[in-house]
Image: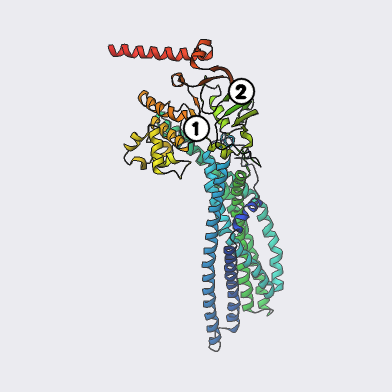
């Protein structure tokens, strides 16, 4: 079985015991639509009243007798029953419409709010959360909620009204026989309530297990080429199959618990009716009540028993829904650690792009004892181009993550234009900083929409201009549908260099005063790298730019180079000065340039042969 790691505040363990109380926080979503609720209640009331009127007519027909003299009265009652049937049909149709649309409206609002909340959660949450697990809660669990607050709720109301009405009319028909029934009700209901805990627990287990399987499937389908390249299809399919089997067993156990609950309820209910019917038959034989009255009482007893039986199944549905409600509530309860303070500090406008790190320490939440940055201090002036270099794990990308405030420093401060970014609105901060990651994210939308991502109001001409500045216009125009060509999921139809140029165009379009380039040209061949680098030089000259580069040849013209090692700033200066110091940078440069020269020489020798 797959065991995902749960993010803080998000549990995947089924050992919890969800309660129907978990549904209460979601009631405001339903109460927004009071008119539909009123319509549903009116329809349920009318349908219940029409159903309860049928036994009264049947009693009259039986007591009057089926004779020629009573034919007129019998005809009247039959016509009345047809009228009652019409009212019942109209009320039932109206009930279905109101409760179905209410459930659909409820789940649409809930899904929108859950997704909006997920979009607000910070990087620390997604360091451990699994996308498939979250999607399961967003889709499968909200669908369970739709049933609970739509059809199940209406069924519960209908049967509750029928049960109360039947009990009242049973007492009216025969207080003695009703006493026997009322004594039996607690004997029936108490075991149902007690067994509901087992149903809720098993339903939550089934939902959790299915979510784990969905998370595993999503993760592997997103990397299907890697799976196939390594011949991992059989092992992956086997593992997913095992997870699905585990989900099936959990669902089967939940179904068994609900089936046992229904069996006990139905047997006890209808056994009590048989007992009451026997007592009533004795009264008819002794002329203490008429056959019509016994028939009326019996019909009400059957209606009440059926309603109670349905309520037991409704209780099972609510028990299952409470598990889903608990899983959704867990997501909504997780609060982002990165939030705008109240009041938020105002960043200067227009922004200059001054950046300062002051004694910054940082450890990732998942590795609190492992310092990613330690006592890091430096200053970058507006318009300056600064390269960040160092061995893998030195903290280069972490620096970018902190500057964009995806995390907050453990200690120290980061300032943009003299304002501590921790005191500013993260949304406003990120509008001033745009980044191009080493592995850019490309969506399955069109090329134009990918460039326009984050700036939906940008014109087509602005999109094309950004593409030209990123040396992407030529290859985009050569695509089958040009800028309207769809990129495929994660940009699968594009090369790595093409994806990077689209990401660069996306960043250029934003015209932010601070540009972060994390190996932004690493996937380009030499010819295209020169084209993009030339295009970027003008863009970089107009704003503050931080460049992460493992290939030192790409940062020779930087205004300054910061050298990081083990999360600390160990060297600072321009290329020539740092080489002369014969420190870490000099060793990295010597290794790269000598290796490159050797590779070039070997290539020339091979070509000569």
Q: What's the CA distance linking mark 2 and mark 1?
A: 21 Å
Q: In this view, does 55 lie above or below 153?
A: below
Q: Residue furthest left?
A: 609
User: Splitting the image into 4 quarters, where does residue 8 fall?
Assistant: top right
Q: Where is residue 419 in the image (x, y as percent from the top left)?
A: 62, 33
Q: Label 1 near label 2: C-beta < 8 Å?
A: no
Residue under pointer 2: 376
Binning the other alpha carbons within 10 Å of mark 1 as few (below 14), some (14 to 19) or many (20 upward) gives many
Q: Which residue lies furthest to the bottom in this view?
A: 69
Q: Position of residue 335 (x, y in %)?
A: 63, 41
Q: Nearer the viewer, residue 382 or 172?
A: 382
Q: Is residue 603 left or right of residue 198?
A: left
Q: Tell me which colouring the rendered structure shows.
A: rainbow
Q: Which of 299 and 290 is in front in this view?
A: 299
Q: In this view, does 47 lie above or below 4?
A: below
Q: In this view, does 46 lie above or below 154?
A: below
Q: Which of 342 and 143 is in front in this view?
A: 342
Q: Where is residue 491 in the image (x, y as percent from the top left)?
A: 41, 36
Residue under pointer 1: 435
Q: Is residue 485 left or right of residue 184?
A: left
């Amino acid at each position: 079985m797959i065991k995902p790691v749960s993010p803080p505040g998000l549990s995947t363990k089924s050992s919890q015991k969800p309660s129907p109380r978990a549904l209460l926080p979601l009631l405001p979503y339903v109460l927004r639509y009071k008119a539909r609720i009123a319509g549903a209640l009116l329809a349920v009331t009318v349908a219940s009243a029409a159903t309860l009127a049928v036994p009264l007519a049947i009693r009259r027909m039986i007591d009057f007798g089926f004779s020629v003299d009573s034919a007129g009265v019998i005809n009247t009652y039959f016509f009345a029953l047809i009228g009652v049937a019409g009212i019942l049909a109209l009320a039932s149709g109206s009930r279905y419409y109101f409760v179905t649309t209410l459930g659909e409206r409820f789940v649409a609002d809930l899904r929108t709010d859950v997704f909006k909340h997920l979009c607000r959660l910070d990087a620390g949450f997604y360091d451990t959360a699994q996308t498939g697990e979250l999607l399961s809660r967003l889709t499968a669990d909200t669908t369970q909620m739709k049933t609970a607050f739509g059809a199940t709720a209406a069924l519960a109301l209908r049967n509750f009204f029928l049960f109360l009405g039947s009990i009242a009319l049973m007492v009216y028909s025969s207080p003695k026989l009703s006493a026997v029934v009322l004594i039996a009700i607690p004997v029936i209901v108490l075991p149902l309530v007690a067994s509901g805990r087992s149903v809720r627990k098993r339903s939550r287990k089934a939902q959790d297990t299915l979510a784990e399987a969905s998370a595993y499937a999503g993760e592997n389908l997103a990397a299907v080429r890697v799976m196939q390249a390594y011949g991992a299809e059989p092992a992956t399919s086997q593992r997913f199959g095992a997870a699905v089997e585990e989900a099936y067993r959990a669902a089967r156990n939940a179904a068994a618990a609900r089936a046992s609950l229904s069996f006990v309820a139905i047997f006890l209910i209808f056994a009590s009716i048989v007992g009451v019917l026997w007592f009533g038959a004795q009264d008819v034989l002794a002329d203490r009540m008429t056959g019509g009255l016994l028939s009326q009482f019996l019909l009400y007893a059957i209606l009440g028993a059926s309603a109670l039986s349905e309520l037991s199944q409704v209780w099972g549905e609510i028990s299952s829904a409470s598990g889903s409600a608990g899983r959704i509530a867990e997501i909504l309860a997780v609060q982002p650690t990165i939030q705008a303070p109240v009041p938020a500090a105002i960043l200067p406008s227009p922004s200059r792009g001054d950046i300062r790190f002051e004694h910054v320490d940082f450890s990732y939440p998942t590795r609190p004892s492992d310092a990613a940055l330690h006592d890091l201090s430096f200053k970058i002036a507006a318009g300056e181009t600064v390269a960040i270099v160092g061995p893998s794990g030195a903290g280069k990308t972490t620096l970018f993550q902190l500057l964009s405030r995806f995390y907050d420093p453990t200690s120290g401060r980061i300032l943009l234009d003299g304002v501590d970014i921790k005191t500013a609105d993260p949304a406003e901060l990120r509008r001033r900083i745009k980044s191009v990651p080493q592995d850019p994210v490309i969506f399955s939308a069109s090329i134009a929409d990918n460039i326009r991502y984050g700036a939906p109001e940008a014109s087509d001409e602005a999109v094309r201009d950004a593409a030209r500045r990123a040396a992407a216009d030529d290859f985009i125009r050569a695509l089958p549908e040009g800028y309207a060509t769809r990129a495929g999921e994660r940009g699968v139809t594009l090369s790595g260099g093409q994806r990077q140029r689209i990401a660069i165009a996306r960043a250029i379009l934003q015209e932010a005063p601070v540009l972060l380039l994390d190996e932004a040209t690493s996937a380009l061949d030499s010819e295209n790298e020169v084209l993009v680098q030339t295009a970027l030089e003008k863009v970089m000259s107009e704003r503050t730019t931080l460049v992460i580069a493992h290939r030192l040849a790409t940062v020779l013209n930087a205004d300054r180079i910061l050298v990081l090692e083990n999360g600390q700033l160990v060297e600072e200066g321009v290329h020539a000065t740092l080489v002369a110091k014969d420190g870490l940078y000099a060793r990295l440069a010597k290794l790269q340039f000598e290796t490159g020269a050797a590779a070039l020489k070997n290539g020339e020798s091979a070509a000569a042969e």
